[in-house]
Amino acid sequence: MTRKPFSPAHDLFRDQVRRFVETEILPYHDDWDEQGVVSREVWKKAGAAGMLCPTVPEAYGGSGADYLFSVVVIEEMARVGATGPGFSIHSEMAAPYLESFGSDDQKEYWLPRLVRGEAISGLALTEPGAGSDLRRMTTSAKKTNSGYVLNGQKVFISNGQLGDVFFVAAKTKNEYATDSVSLFLVEAETPGFKRGRNLKKIGAKAQDTSELFFDNVEVPHENLVGEEEGKGFFQLMHGLARERLTIAVSSLAKSEGAFRETLAYAAERELFHKKLTDFQNTQFKLAEVQTELTVGRCLVDRLLEDYLNNDLSADTAAAAKLWTTEMQGRTVDTCLQLFGGWGYMWEYPIARAYAEARVERVAGGSSEVMKSIICKSLFKKMDIKADFS
């Protein structure tokens, strides 16, 4: 299928990224799984290859490329299950807040470092008692004469062990309100900042995911993201369409990768003196998966065009995230079934794909949250009153 949004320049970049993944990531990924973290060296190599923050303007060390170059990196990593390096968290979910809302000084200092992979970034939002409802967070930022003092705890933070700088959401006033949250840049070397344990997960074992602790962490006024306090909720909402489209892109590519593995296995596997592909049940199951992937590809590529044209709404992005992640769960489960007992063995990529598919329906907003967003938008258009509290 010809993919309309992409150009020959994107295809050339895809070839380069694919070679990088095959030579600099896949040979080491099993070791990273065991260690629970990737090497810092691969970040620097990815930066040198132009794979980090490609949309950052040239003035700040980036390529000034369009979002499709980011998509290429996401897809090429996802299709082979290279979930260890948290490049998309860094490039698509953290750095864009600096691009959109950072001061000139913040951008001039941090963006070139993020592009080169010299500094690794993370997004610290979730807390033990506050996930989707950010207004429930308890991490506080109290204003002082010299800046702010942060206290609190975050959890499930990607790039938590390797991260050099984190975009931290904290309350600048103690209220359950959207204007109570602000974003701050917090460097990992700041006194009072502490990394917790590297959390053990069902999947994506090489991706470092951590607790973070803030014990009287002092940051200067200059580390506030944006010109004034209380804009954190707005800033986070501003980036959600891109983040959820990014998850949809990744989920679809992971599903396609799992399907390719399954086709290759089914074509070789013999059962009752026949190839697995000779059985009608196998043929029908493969046809069902192919149909879902085709629908998903049409959806995602259409929404990529919408995003490039600044025409992707929050509810449509939520729908894409909902559908693709649920589809990923269905299709990977179907694929694993065709592997039989071998599909349950961790050494087989399909087993890892199955384990790693589960988090997609939770991370970046659960499926239930996506449904709520979609329904709110629907009811608003239809002028239907309902309680969404």
Image: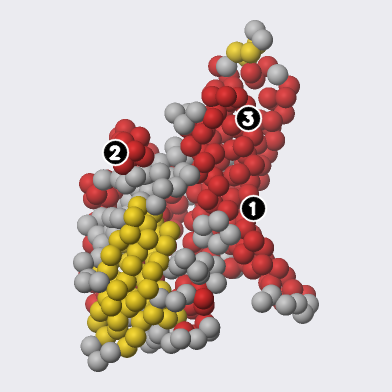
Which is more toward the observer, 387 or 105? Answer: 387
Residue annotated with mark 3? 337
Q: Residue 304, can we see it? A: no
Give coordinates of residue 174: x percent, y percent. 46, 86
Separation (CA) of disc 2 from disc 1: 32 Å
Label 2: few (<14), some (14–19) or many (≥20) C-alpha neighbours in 10 Å: some
Which quarter shows the N terminus? top right
Residue designated by label 1: 323
Q: Is residue 168 left or right of residue 3?
A: left
Disc 1, SS: helix
Please name the amino acid that badge 1 sits on: Trp
Locate residue 56, reporting x and y percent. 33, 64
Question: Residue 119 in the image: x percent, y percent?
Answer: 25, 60
User: Which type of secondary structure does the marked residue at label 2 adopt?
Assistant: helix
**Looking at the image, which residue is at 30% across and 61% down?**
195
Residue under label 2, please give it: 24
Residue 65, picture quadrant:
bottom left
Please tell me how crowded label 1 is: few (under 14), some (14-19), or many (20+) other residues with Cα within 10 Å.
some
- Dot 3: few (<14), some (14–19), or many (≥20) neighbours within 10 Å? some
Where residue 211 sits, quadrant-wise, is bottom left
Q: Earlier in the sequence, mark 2 or mark 3?
A: 2
Say whether residue 348 is left or right of residue 221. right
Q: Foreground mark, 2 or 3? A: 3
